[in-house]
Amino acid sequence: MKKYSRFSKCIVLVLTLFFYAHLLVAQIPAQPKPPRLVNDFSNTLSADEQMQLERKLVNYNDTTSTQILVVLVSDLAGYDEADFAFRLGEQWGVGQKGSNNGVVILVKPKTDRERGKAFIASGYGLEGVIPDALAKRVVEQEMIPAFKNDDYFEGLWLGTDAIIGLASGLYAADRYDQSQGAAWFIPILVLVIVFFMMRAGRSANHINSKGSNLPFWTALFLASQSGRSHSGSWRNFSGGSGGFGGGGSGFGGFGGGSFGGGGAGGSW
C-alpha cells in the first residue's frame, strides 16, 4: 500500500512538472499570421511607429536576406530575457536556414513594479560580427538611454541602425566606438550620394570609392537609414510610397534560422 502511495505521488509530481513546463513553453508568443518583423505584444508603440520600423526591417531583409526581429512583451513568462529571446528566435526560425543570419531584439518595457529589460540575440551566422560584448554595448549605449525617457521607438530605431551596420560590415566590431564620433557626417554623405545619383546616374562607386566593400544597394540603404538617428527629417527617407527595396509591408516570412546562445542585454 505504501509502495503504491509513493508511486502515485511520483506520477502526480511528474505530471505537475510536465504541465508547468508545457505552460511556460506555451507562453512564448506564437508567430503571428501574416508574419511581421515588428511585433508589439505590450502595446507600447503607436501604429505609425510600428509601420516605420517594419518598413525599415523589411527593406533590409529584402536587400540582404538578414532578418532582424523586434519583439516587445509585457511579460517574460517565467524566463530570463536571454532564454526568452533565444527560444523565440529558434521557434520562429528567424534568419535563413543554413546561413542562420537572424537577430532578435527583445524588449520588456519598464513598469512601476518591474525594471525594464532588453536583449539582443544573434543567430549562429552573425555571432562573429555581433559578439556578446558589442551586443551589450548597443543595448546600453543606443537603446537604454532612450528607453529611460520612455521613447521606445527612438531606442529601437537607434538599436536597429547599429545592428544593421554591424551585420552588413558597414563598420567592424572593434571600430564601433570610433564610428559614433563621426556619425554627424552620415546625413551629409546621403545628400551627396543622392545628388550625384540624380545628376550622373553612377553606380556603386559613389560609396565603394570611400573604402566600403558593401554592394551599392546595401550601402545606400544603410546610409539612408542611419541618417534617421541624427536628424528627424531623415526618418522617412527609405519610405515614401513604396519605399526603397520593395517598400510596403510585404514580409515573406522567416527562413528557419537557428540560434546558439550568442547575445547580451541590459536593464534600467
Image (cartoon, rainbow, N blue to C red):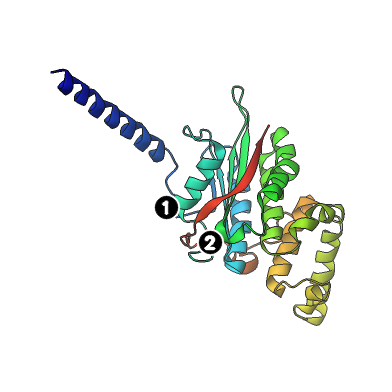
Pick the front one: 82 or 28: 82
Residue 102 relative to residue 128: left or right? left
Q: Secondary structure at mark 1?
A: loop
Measuring from the top left, give residue 230's x and y in whole percent: 80, 51
Q: Residue at x 49, y 57 (%)?
A: 258
Measuring from the top left, give residue 209's x and y in whole percent: 82, 76
Q: What's the mark number on residue 100?
A: 2
Pick the front one: 159 or 18: 18
Give how far apart the Cα atoms at labels 1 and 2 are: 22 Å
Q: Residue furthest left?
A: 1
Q: Residue furthest top?
A: 2
Residue 110 relative to residue 253: left or right? right
Please rate how many residues cluster around mark 1, counting C-alpha atoms within 10 Å: few if below 14, some from 14 to 19, many from 20.
few
Measuring from the top left, give residue 35's x and y in whole percent: 47, 54
Q: Is residue 145 above or below residue 68?
A: above
Give the mark, 1 or 2, whose residue is nearer the N terminus: 1
Q: Are marks 1 and 2 in contact (CB under 8 Å)?
A: no
Residue 252 relative to residue 59: left or right? left
Image quadrant assignment for residue 60: bottom right
* Residue 40 visible from this viewpoint: no
- Identify the amino acid type marked 1: Lys
> Mark 1 = which residue?
33
Q: What's the mark number on residue 108?
A: none
Q: Residue at x 72, y 41 (%)?
A: 140
- Identify the amino acid type marked 2: Asn
Pick the front one: 40 or 15: 15
Q: Residue furthest front?
A: 3
Quarter of the image with the C terminus in it? top right
Q: Residue at x 57, y 66 (%)?
A: 65
* Residue 7 visible from this viewpoint: yes
Quarter of the image with the N terminus in it? top left
